Image: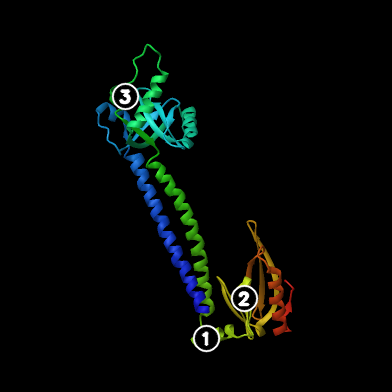
Amino acid sequence: MIKKKYKLIIRFNIIGCIFLVLTIFSFVLMHHLKTQGFEKATSLAENYEDETIKVGEASYVDIVERPVKICRYSDDVTYYEINDGDRFYIMRAGNDWYDDMMDGIAEDGEFHVVGSVLKISDSDKETIKEHFNDKLPDNVEPWTKESFDDYYKGVCIQYMYPVRMAMICVYVGLVLALFAFLFLLMGIKGFVSFNKTLHGISDTQLQMIDNELLDPATMVIKVANTYLTPRRIVYADIDLAFIPYEEVARAYRSDASYKGVHSVFVTVVTRDGRKHKIAMMNALFKGVNEAVDTILSEIHKRNPNAVIGEEQ
């Protein structure tokens, strides 16, 4: 059983390392996408002027006026008409970015739009063209397919792509980093505790402890990962402890709280003055109080000389 617990600790470390590698990959990908988006983006205005527009290329436009909504592309994406003070462009962007653009223009007088140049489908072109024509006065020549393609070149800039993908990588990376931290924290803590406890214990002694754990007389406190064998207390969770009953000088309930998480555990003080925290449980778990009472009662039964329930 102890070896199985140890293998579990090793798995925690392996999983933590995998999450760490994925975290690093996410941030490397984020850096690559941001580099592609910001550093390699070309001016869309210059591309229009030079007629060097390339679909899929990262470009930018510094817009100076409020984006004007044209029509919806999907439920959460809209076509906008934007301008940089010299000419107009068509932008496709998520609705959630509209307020950011407005704030940027209000604060700085312009907003830096970075994205990818994409082709506009024929059906979307027709919808956009109809929208423009509906807004034109009667004495102005309406847009035709030819005039639309001649001016807009049949493309739009999709805002925040690939930069938007870079931001998604950041969020994913942070989540992966959290998992990596938690698994490595448990894994390393367990690795240190298990190796410290197992140091100097022979395979024969370990087999004897395993046999005790299988003894029908052993009391198993599952909620606390604690085993009360006929000869000793075995605590096998992230930490590992073997405490013979005759070595117990004091044992008492302890409570701790960290950032709103309340934990309950049993502190065992051995005759050499060392303190061992065993039976670590979340206070919200069912049967916590009963588990603590059972452990303290069993320790007292096995060692009447131990002082029970007095924290010093």
Is 268 positioned to the left or the right of 147 in the image? right
**Disc on res. 148:** 3
Q: Residues within 10 Å of mark 1 (few under 14, many from 20)?
A: some
The image quadrant of residue 237 is: bottom right
Q: Disc 2 on helix, strand or loop?
A: strand
Looking at the rendered structure, the kind of residue marked 1 is: Gln
Q: Where's residue 112, x and y in %?
A: 40, 33
Task: Give the distance between the C-alpha atoms of the residues marked 1 and 2, in whole angstroms.
Answer: 18 Å
Relative vertical location of residue 99 with respect to residue 233 in this rendering, above or below: above
Looking at the rendered structure, the kind of residue marked 3 is: Phe
Q: Which residue is mark 2?
A: 226
Kindly report which numbered mark, 3 or 2, lies closer to the viewer in this rendering: 3
Q: Which residue is mark 1?
A: 207
Q: Residues within 10 Å of mark 2 (few under 14, many from 20)?
A: many
**Front position in the image: 80 or 256:** 80
Mark toward the start of the polypeptide (3 vs 2): 3
Kindly report which numbered mark, 1 or 3, lies closer to the viewer in this rendering: 3
Task: Give the distance between the C-alpha atoms of the residues marked 1 and 3, in whole angstroms.
Answer: 83 Å
Q: Residues within 10 Å of mark 3 (few under 14, many from 20)?
A: some
Mark toward the start of the polypeptide (1 vs 3): 3
Is 46 positioned to the left or the right of 237 in the image? left
- For the C terminus, which image quadrant? bottom right
